[in-house]
Amino acid sequence: MLKQFSLWFVLLISSLILFASCNKDDEIVNPANQNKLVLKGNISALYKDGMIKFNNGQKIFSDSMISKVIVFYPQGYYNIANVVDGKFSIEVEKGKPAFMIFAGPNDNYLGFLCLKDGFESIPLIKISDDVTTIDLQNIILNNKIGSPTHNPLGTEIQLNEEEQQILSMFDDFFYPIVRNPDVDGNGKIDLLENKFYRLQVL
C-alpha cells in the first residue's frame, strides 16, 4: 500500500510542477510520443433537428452542437479531433492522466468527460500493451457532464478501487480547469488560444 501511494504521490507532484511551469501566455507544443492508443466514441444524441440551421442554402451549425473533442494533459499540451456524423476518434498517450473536453464550432466550451463521480481524468495507465483502442461507445451529456456507456475503468484501464481513490485526489487539483477551461471568459477555450493558466495551491 505504501509503495502504491508513493508512486501516485510522485505522479501528482511531478504533474503539478509541470503544470505550474506554464504561464497563461505560453504556447503549447505537443511532443512526439509513440506510446499511444485511440479513444473513440459517439455523441450522436446531440445531433438533432433544429440544431443545424440553413442560411441561403448554407449549413450553419449551432453553438450548442459538439464539433470537436479535445484531450489535454497536466503538462499543457493537447490533441484535437473533429466530431463527424456524431462520431470521434482521437489519439492519446499511454502512461499519464488526461482530460477530455467538448467544444462547439466556435471553440466554445460544451462539457467534459467523467468516467465516474469525482473522476474527471482518464487515467491512461496500467493498460495492457495489446490494447490499441478504447471505445467509450455512446457519451450522454447532462449539465455539461459526459458519461460513457462503456467505462474503461476496471476493464481496459486495470486500476483497482484503491488506486482509483488515490487518483481521484489528483483530479481535485485539475477540477477547476476541466469545469471552466474558458478562464478569461471570452467565449473560447483557453487551450485553443495557446493559453494555459498556472495552477496555484494556497
Image (tube, helix red, strand yellow):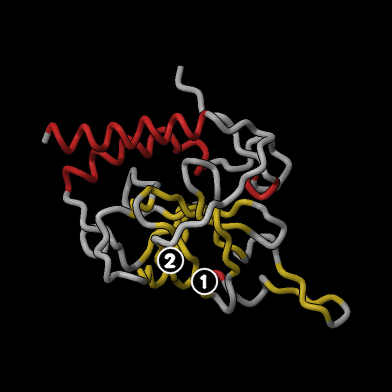
The image shows residue 106 at horizontal and vertical percentages of: 72, 58
What amino acid type should be assigned to the residue bearing mark 2?
Ile
Decide which of 179, 167 is in the foreground and name it.
Answer: 167
The image shows residue 104 at horizontal and vertical percentages of: 65, 60
Q: Which residue lies furthest to the left in this view?
A: 1
Label 2 crowd (10 A; few <14 / some 14-19 / many >=20): many
Marks 1,2: beta carbons within 8 A: no
Left or right side of 166 for 69: right
Label 1 crowd (10 A; few <14 / some 14-19 / many >=20): some
Please report the residue visible at 11 percent of the width from the left and 36 percent of the height from the top.
1
Residue 36 vertical position relative to residue 133 in the rendered view, above or below: above
| Residue that badge 1 annotates | 88
> What is the quadrant of residue 201 in the picture?
top left
Q: How far apart are marks 1 and 2 (CA)?
A: 11 Å
Q: Nearer the viewer, mark 1 or mark 2?
A: 1
| Residue that badge 2 annotates | 139
Q: Residue furthest bottom?
A: 57
Left or right side of 56 for 197: left
What amino acid type should be assigned to the residue bearing mark 1?
Phe
* Secondary structure under the numbered disc 1 in the rendered image: strand
* Secondary structure under the numbered disc 2 in the rendered image: strand
Please report the residue visible at 48 percent of the width from the left and 65 percent of the height from the top.
91
Left or right side of 98 for 20: right
Residue 93 vertical position relative to residue 41 in the rendered view, above or below: above
The image shows residue 170 at horizontal and vertical percentages of: 35, 36
Point out the tag, 1 or 2, that comes first from the N-terminus.
1
The image shows residue 97 at horizontal and vertical percentages of: 38, 48
> What is the quadrant of residue 60 in the picture?
bottom right
